[in-house]
Image: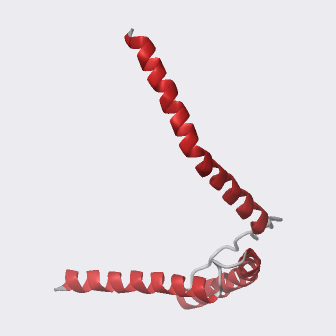
Amino acid sequence: MVPRVWSLMRFLIKGSVAGGAIYLVYDQELLGPSDKSQAALQKAEEVVPTAMYQFSQYVCEQTGLKIPQLPAPPKFNFHIRESWNSGIITMMSALSVAPSKAWEYSKEGWEYLKERTK
């Protein structure tokens, strides 16, 4: 009985986390324009460190443990829009060339096999 309850609890927790992640992505429109994605990333960079610090202070107060201060996260001058678009363009160009390259390589392979079997 207990293993079945435990597996049900694990399933419900995983489902809740997955559902929450999907809702967050939909609510923040992270799959929309890259401007909104970049704004959400900047917002997370501002909010997450303070939330982690407050949570660690709460844990210290409740348990009496001393948690060392973490170093500040590095600052990146990184534009998602530019790298995302260049990555998509590179991938799409590789996919568009793939059929002709496959035909070319198979033709070369067939010619090579013809030569070797003579």
Q: In the picture shown, does residue 13 fall above or below 77? A: below
Residue depicted at x 47% and y 25% = 109
How many numbered badges does the structure rendering display? 0
Residue depicted at x 62% and y 83% = 56
Q: Is residue 65 left or right of residue 50?
A: left
Residue 89 occupies quadrant: bottom right
Which residue is nearer to you in this view: 118 or 85? Answer: 118
Which residue is nearer to you in this view: 11 or 113? Answer: 113
Percent coordinates x, y for residue 98 in the rendering: 57, 45
Percent coordinates x, y for residue 2 in the rendering: 20, 85
Percent coordinates x, y for residue 76 in the rendering: 80, 65
Q: Farthest residue in the right direction? A: 77
Residue depicted at x 52% and y 25% = 108
The image quadrant where one finds the N terminus is bottom left
Residue 45 occupies quadrant: bottom right
Residue 31 occupies quadrant: bottom right
Q: In the picture shown, does residue 118 fall above or below 19? A: above
Q: Is residue 69 left or right of residue 79?
A: left
Q: Is residue 66 left or right of residue 4?
A: right
Percent coordinates x, y for residue 49 in the rendering: 71, 80
Which residue is nearer to you in this view: 69 or 27? Answer: 27
Q: Farthest residue in the top direction? A: 118
